[in-house]
Amino acid sequence: VHITADKGRCVGAAQCVLAAPAVFDQDEEGLVAPVTVDPAGADWPAVRQAVHLCPSSAIRIDGE
């Protein structure tokens, strides 16, 4: 199970950073930049929230 973030779809809303700051950041252009693609178990609820909140569906969880 891992995270995929599509910068081509990202609109820079930063909802992922607000929901899961230990897992997501933004690059110099304001686009999604995962800190890790394989977060610790305790971070998964926040990752799922970030996926749900992303207005452009730029983040997905693969292998679930």
Image: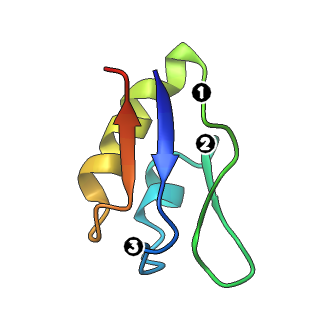
Return the x and y of residue 42 as percentages of the image width and height.
Answer: 52, 18
Query: Which of pointers 2 and 3 lies earlier in the amino acid sequence?
Result: 3
Q: CA distance from mark 2 to mark 1?
A: 7 Å
Label 1 residue SS: loop
Q: CA distance from mark 3 to mark 1?
A: 22 Å
Residue at (67, 38) in percent of width and height: 36
Residue at (32, 48) in percent of width and height: 51
Query: Which of pointers 3 and 1 lies earlier in the amino acid sequence?
Result: 3
Return the x and y of residue 19 as percentages of the image width and height.
Answer: 44, 50
> Given the image, on which type of amino acid does mark 1 rest?
Pro
Query: Where is 60 relative to 1, above or below?
Result: below
**Near-viewer residue (16 or 57):** 57
Residue most toward the top? 41
Please give the residue where the numbered disc 3 appears in the rendered image: 9
> Given the image, on which type of amino acid does mark 2 rest?
Val
> Given the image, on which type of amino acid does mark 3 rest?
Arg
- Residue 39's disc is 1
Please give the residue where the numbered disc 2 appears in the rendered image: 23
Task: Tell me where residue 25 sits by quadrant.
Answer: bottom right
**Near-viewer residue (54 or 9):** 9
Return the x and y of residue 35 as percentages of the image width and height.
Answer: 70, 46
Judged by depth in the image, the label closer to the viewer, 2 or 3, is 3
